[in-house]
Structure formats: C-alpha cells, structure tokens
Image: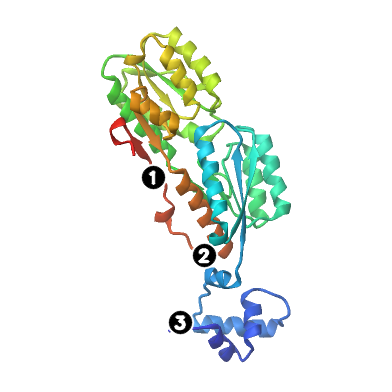
Amino acid sequence: MKPTVHDIAAVAGVSLATVDRVLNRRPGVSARTRDKVEAAVSTLGFVRDVAAANLAKGRVYPLTFVLPANDNSFMRDLEAEVREAIARAPVERTAISIVKVPPFDADALVRALDALIDEKPAGVALVAVDAPDVVAAVDRLVEAGIPVVTLVSDLPTSRRSHFAGIDNLAAGRTAASLLGRFVGREPSSIAVVAGSLLVRDHRERLEGFRAVMAKDYPHLTVLDAIEGRDDPAVVERLLGAELDRRGDISGIYSLGAGNRGLLAALRSAPRRDRIAVVAHELTGTTREALDVGLIDAVLNQDAGHEVRSAIRVLKAKADGAPLLAGQERIRIDIFLKDNLP
C-alpha cells in the first residue's frame, strides 16, 4: 500500500495541516518541523501525485500560444486547433490565450515573449523564428519559471522544455526520395520554394532534401531556394519567373506554405504536365491539387496532435510530472491522390 499524508503526519508527529504546508512549500513551518516532515517523506518513500492534487484543488493552468498572423493555411489550421482547445478549457482545466505576431518577425516575437514575463502564465507555446534574440527571450521566460514549448519550428539552442513538431530533416529527406523517383533519370533541375530560411524547420527540410538529392540523384540540380514568405502572391510571381526562365525544371519541392501561389504559377507554365510536385501540409488547397494531379505527394503533420502535445507538456512541467515520449512524438504522414482521407 502506498504511504499517505496521514502516514507522514503520524511518523513526523505533526498535523495534516503541517504536512500540507511542507508539501506545498508554504510558509508558517519552523525549520525543525520541516526537517521532521521531509525525513518522514524520505523514510516512507512517499511520492506525491501532483496532478491528482491539482485536480482535487481545481487548479486551472493559464497557457499562452504565440502564433504568426499570416495567410498560411497550415497556421490557420493550427490556430483553429488552439481555439478548439479553448472550447475544451473547462474539461482540461486550462485558460488559453492567443497572441498573434507578424510572421518571420523576430523583433515582434521577442516583444511578445518579454511581455508575457509579467503575466506569468503556467506555460508558453510558440512558433519560433530562429534568431539569437528570440533564443534569449525564450531563456528569459524559463529563468522566470515559465516553461516553453516550441511548435512546428524548433529552437534547440534555447532552454525550451520541448519541441512539438515533426523531424524536419527527415521530412526533407523523404521529399527528396519521393521527388527523385517521380522525375526519372534524365538530367534536369529541381525548384525549391521556402517561406523563409529564418525559420529552422524550413532550413532543416532544405538540408535533408539537398543531402539525399546529392547522394541518390546526382543527375538532378537543386536550384537556390525561392523565399516566398508564405505569401501566395509572392510565390506566384517568383516561381512563375523561374519557370519562364528555365525550361529544364522537372520537379518542385514546396517546403513551406504559399501553395495557392505555387499552383497559380504551375497552371500558367507551358510544361506543367511534366513537372512533379511535392508539398507540405494537407490543406484544402493541397487536397484539391492532389485530387486533380497538380501535386503528386503531400507530407503532413497533425496540427491537432501538436497543440494537444504542447498543452500536455506544459501542464506536466507545471506539475513537475514526467513526460511520455511516445505520446508526444509527431509523425510524418505521406498523402497521395490514392490515399486521401
């Protein structure tokens, strides 16, 4: 039988109220009495179930999600998942707020994170821009006792608690393996469309993509990445110009968003039926493009899983509870026209 607080009180010779003060680190207990209680805890092997204690007390976890404010279909889906979590707040005992910042704007992100220090939420989840000032801002939150989870794009050099996202190097490698098979053995060029190489997930996808292309498909030349800032109009203009300028493009890897612009450029390309396309995130736009054959494969990450994972991790960190690594692993799903759900 597991020891209880009643057992601790009996061994230490104190009241239940005193045991409660010591376990919850509240004042009003002398050093001698605190030592007696802690010795009883150690002797009995008592392990406190913090989550159960918080449930009994009706604790509510205030959490903040910092998201980019842009016309990115996946980011809109991510925000929709956060809003669904807000709707579940009474059941999950959370109080979730959303802070919007301009996309790829490190300065704006730093200001938003610094403002949260005074608000003292139980945890913060953010889509990170990989910049030294952002790393420092995340570290300031952690130093203030506020755990941080990165979403979609990581900051591994920071003191963040957890990353809720896919293995982006593996995603890029997977995209290269697919596209290399799709385009055949004739020498040709591959266009790459990124949002911004200021974010780590896009850089890692490109790194993995280039590594596999160089090793397994040396007859394919990977062109310099077009940075469309996830803006469909910018992607359409820049990719359209690239397709007009080069007649040897046999494939396109879209590793960010802005896919409405990609499809508009592709529809205007004179050789569109000879260009294979691999993109990211199964949205309404990419689903329709898969169905009509404009896109050949889509690599997807589950936005809902990422949001739920961030909430679980932040609550666990607030409680000092362990994580279940397998539950928090985000997988890469591959969709073709033939297996659309």
Which residue is label 3 attached to?
A: 2
Tell me which residue sits at (44%, 34%) in the image. Answer: 283
Marks 1/3: CA distance?
Answer: 37 Å
Tell me which residue sits at (44%, 8%) in the image. Answer: 244
Residue 321's tag is 2
Which sits in the foreground, 323 or 74? Answer: 74
- Is 251 placed above or below 33 here? above
**Label 3 vs 2, first from the N-terminus:** 3
Quadrant into which the C terminus falls:
top left
Q: Is residue 288 left or right of residue 88?
A: left
Which sits in the foreground, 38 or 121? Answer: 121
Q: Amino acid at mark 1?
A: Arg
| x and y percentages locating residue 307 in the rendered image | 51, 48
Marks 3/2: CA distance?
Answer: 18 Å
Tell me which residue sits at (26%, 19%) in the image. Answer: 184
| x and y percentages locating residue 338 in the rendered image | 28, 33
Is label 1 in a helix, a strand or a loop? Answer: loop
Q: Amino acid at mark 3?
A: Lys
Q: Amino acid at mark 2?
A: Ala
**Label 1 vs 3, first from the N-terminus:** 3
**Within the image, what quadrant is residue 2 found in?**
bottom left
Residue 331's tag is 1
Evaluate whether residue 158 shows in this view: yes
Please tell me whether mark 2 or mark 1 is closer to you in this view: 1
Is label 3 in a helix, a strand or a loop? Answer: loop
Quadrant into which the N terminus falls:
bottom left
Is label 2 in a helix, a strand or a loop? Answer: loop
